[in-house]
Amino acid sequence: MIEVFHLVPALLIGALAVYTTVARDTFAATVGFIAYGLMLTVAWVQLHGVDVALTESAIGGGLTGLLLVRASAKLRATEAAARAERPRASTRLAAAILAAAVSAGLAIAVLALPDPAPTLAPEVLANMGPTGVGNPITAVLMAFRATDTLLEAIVLLLALVGVWSLAPDRVWGGRPGPRYNADPDGILAFIARVLPPIGIIVGIYIFWVGADDPGGKFQGATIVAAMWLLVLMAGLTDAPPISRRLLRAGLVAGPVAFIAIGFAGVATAGAFLAYPDGWSKPLILVVEFALMPSLALTLGLIMAGAPERAEAASPREAAP
Amino acid sequence: MTADAVTTPGGLLLPLAVLVPFLGMIAGLVLGGRNAQRVAMVTIVAGVAIALGIAQSMLQSGDTLVYVLGGFAPPLGIALRADGLSVVMMVAVAVVIGGIGVYARGDFGTPDGVREARAPLMYWLLLLAVWGSLNLVFTSGDLFTLYVALELLTFAGVPLVCLDGKGETLRSALRYLLFALAGSIFYLLGAVLVYGEWGTLDVALLAQRVQPGPVTWAAAALMTTGLLAKTALFPLHLWLPPAHAGAPPAASAVLSALVVKGSFFIVVRLWFDAMPALPGFAAAQLLAGLGAAAIIVGNVVALRQERLKLLIAYSTLAQIGYLFIMFPLAFDAGTGAFVRGEALAGGMLQAISHATAKAAMFLAAGLIYATLGHDRIADLAGAARRVPLSVLAFALGGVALTGALPSGAYVAKKLLLGAADASGQWWWALVLQAGGLFTTGYVLLVLSHALRASADAPAPRVRVRRSQEAAALALAACSLLLGFADVVLPGDLVKSPLDPGELATLVVTVAAGAAIALALGRRLPALPAGAALAAIGSPIRRATVAVGLLVERLDFALRHWHVAGLSLVVLTLLFAAAMSGAR
Amino acid sequence: MSTLVDLFSYVAIGAGAIFFLAGTVGLLRFPDTLTRLHALTKADNLGLGLVVLGLLPHVAGVLPALKLIAIWLLVLLSGADASQLIARAARRGEPRSRPGP
Amino acid sequence: MNAATVFGLLATALVGVGLYGFIVNPQPLRKILAFNVIGSGVFLLFGAIARRGAALGLGGDPVPQALLITGIVVAFSATALAVTVLLRLFDETGSTTLSSGVAPSASEPDPAKARE
């Protein structure tokens, strides 16, 4: 009987994935993908990965979904041209057969996984004590494999640099994204005034609770970034020009603090990104507090996109 | 339990080698404007010093450098390791980045009157990001950290392709990004299966634990194919020619010489360190078979190109194939595993000499384009007179690639041929020789056009900066002088150039190269005995041109998206079958 | 006592499920965007409220209970606003009010 | 057939479906969607493996779950970069097709004649 609680969401996720792939219209496929992302969260909860469920719904379903919906709305004009380029039936059949073969091979491999599954859970629990954090995943992210988390922050920063490098030359240094100006006393402006305070509190709560329970800085930063985007889309504020040095300093403050504490670890604890005894928890908190705003800013700016408008854009220009 | 990895003296240089370029990128982004270039120059000096420091401490200790990050040894934590291969590649990358950095001061200096311009700022940031991610690829001992390094490398490489913002380069950049992402997700899928089976992602621990089995075959096949997609080995090369030819010259040099070496290095790390006994003989033959096909298709299509930068891009395609020939030669039939011997040394030396030579060729092509205003091979007449040093740099780079005497490729070819004879695989020896002849072919083709006196003598369009020509020449000289690296390698490989055997080989190579150029070259220069030669050769020429056209059409067909996608999947299945068949 | 609480939960969550079902049937059967929105927001919000109500007695402690209620209020807020925006877009934008998927 | 096996097999199916979409769908945005489906399949497989490694009262092996969070963020950055390049390509050229260039033809003049 217990199997139905796993099989039903699994089949639903599979069906949504198939729909996303075979739907004729790109916009419909994107909407299907967002539903697919949210249903994945259920799967993560059933796999006892609550931290991952948070990340998947915040970043996988939320931000990625917004990105893709906005793009598919903008690319409606290219639908017909794309449909004309559809490969012949024979190619599609070959692709289907080969993809099925890969899936079958993977299924064999999954079923052939060793029964006493190898795990690092004992090592994590054994070494978690000195780190001072209660959530084992945060211990892995911030202590045992802190380098991966540092590299991840650098990946986000590099993705933002890549996004900015795609700006037209004439507006370099300008403001990213179009100038939204919704009706000031409309519904969007209303929710953009009511929701952000709540969202920021929830985001900081999720960030803070991450030390001992599911949560963490990436999930928290995503929620704070989403609130900033909401305010941006309601036209209550305008995106900052990217030439502003303060903005760039804010972007890099997190990674720089992380690297600084890492090199301090060389002197005090004998290894890069090692924490001296007893100082582990406070240092992790300092790093997380430094990373959180930088990540929220970086995620927000990645979502805002490449600069499109000159810096001196007047706040209330006519809606296009 | 196996002994935990422990930090060796001088190990701290490894995290420094990874983080200094990224810190340079961060500082360049915040300071912005002209400071980005100054920060990049300082970072280049620091980075070269660190690479030499690592090499020095490696020679001193004679053993692999290890640095345990965060104080937690694998399998829980991550260790950075630098063995002979990593150190050699890091020094080579540092030198090439230095050369390209000096060249790029000319193309990507911030114009005066502007506080900050997009392309210059972005170029310096992305150059440092490529360097940081490459150092991470060479030193990381953890498969997941290698995945993050691969993504960093792709995120830094793609914007370089479309730095000029034109439509065609944006399309090439998108095609490159999408296919590279497919490659890295295949690699991650393989890494996930490896963790599921062996409970660790650390390369050294995997070497002790891995046994053949269905899960590990699937993982190895997925990871290898994913990495081949990112290295653009034939038939997964749809994105490379337009991307590398379309980018600005200083960016093409970084992409062709360095970025493709990152994923190639991880294939070497996997097949020689993580799971040496797993892939087996059949998979190595398949891998080298793809390499041989890349050599043939790459070179033939290169000979048929109209534009110089596309010719060099297709030459990269062929040279990438050349790099994979070493795998079957390093296979020890006795133990059934890949051993670190002469074949591996030859392969890595070939990779390094290609890096320096290809960078020099792209930089020289950039200078020729800046001077003549175009890079059509047929109209290169008079180039040698107007921009002699650039043509000389191109020539030296080309000669270095063909494996002429003092070049690194010569020593590499000797090592690989020795390994082929030792293992009795004569067919790979043939492929190696053919590769050299083809390379000579297109180098002679380009030089014959460039050295021709042009009928009209238009004034040079732009005075080329001395430093740029010096940088291109220095890199070309580097690849030529690598031959003297044999003092480090075993055996007396480098005979004196006046040795009759060497002279004979040289003459045969040049003659055969000329024949190939005449047969397949798209535009033939007006030779003095043109009419007589044409009368004799035209039936042969018409046949070879037909063959050349056939190969060009095959390449064009393979560079359609869905055909490349299907070959990606077919290759995964083939590698899985080849590896499972080995037992 | 606990059976009474369980019974209450079954009834409440069951009713909630029925409202969700009603909302979905409304989505599939109603002719145009506006009526579908009406069905969805009304039925689903009420359904969620009932499910939350049904879960409240099983929650350990006050804070999780408050969190559940906060979730319901947030869904109410965002659901109402989203449907208003979609309704406005439907009326102003493309006249896709013909029935069928 | 516990949860880990069910979602492990689902993951392999997602990879297959995503791969089909990645190869066949001509619209680059659909390829990005397909890449995300494959990515979520790979992450789900890693989650199933983490669940199999559950021990000592933990819901799952924390190391893969931590790597998953990093993986999802990296996949998001890749999607964001790909979408930005795609939109910039659309702004610049008005089309989003990936195919470019023309088939090689025997346009090359007859060598003998060309040299006189």
Image: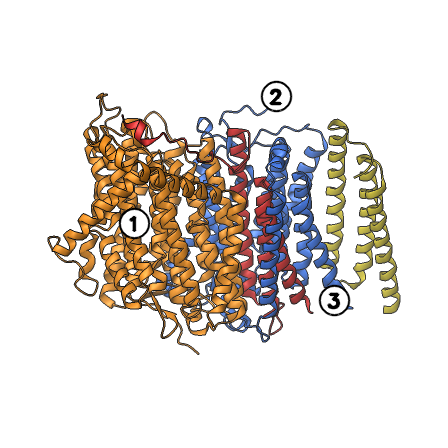
Mark closer to the chain start, 3 or 2: 3
Kindly indicate which chain is depicted in orange in the rendered structure.
B
> In this figure, which residue is indicated by the disc labeled 2?
A318
Above or below residue A157? Residue A144 is below
SS of the residue under disc 2: loop
Q: From the top left corner, tell me how far across and down residue B276 is, in percent.
A: 40, 68
Alpha carbon of mark 1 to alpha carbon of mark 3: how far?
Answer: 57 Å
Kindly indicate which chain is depicted in red in the rendered structure.
D
Q: Is residue B485 left or right of residue B143?
A: left
Q: From the top left corner, tell me how far across and down residue B21 is, in percent.
A: 35, 49
> In this figure, which residue is indicated by the disc labeled 3?
A3
SS of the residue under disc 1: helix
SS of the residue under disc 3: helix
Above or below residue A137? Residue A153 is above
Q: Residue at x 31, y 53 (%)?
A: B351
The three-letter code of the residue at mark 3 reads Glu
The count of marks equals: 3
The three-letter code of the residue at mark 1 reads His
Q: Residues within 10 Å of mark 1 (few under 14, many from 20)?
A: many
Kindly indicate which chain is depicted in blue in the rendered structure.
A
Q: Write down the chain letter for disc 1.
A: B
The three-letter code of the residue at mark 2 reads Ala
> In this figure, which residue is indicated by the disc labeled 1?
B354
Q: Residues within 10 Å of mark 2 (few under 14, many from 20)?
A: few
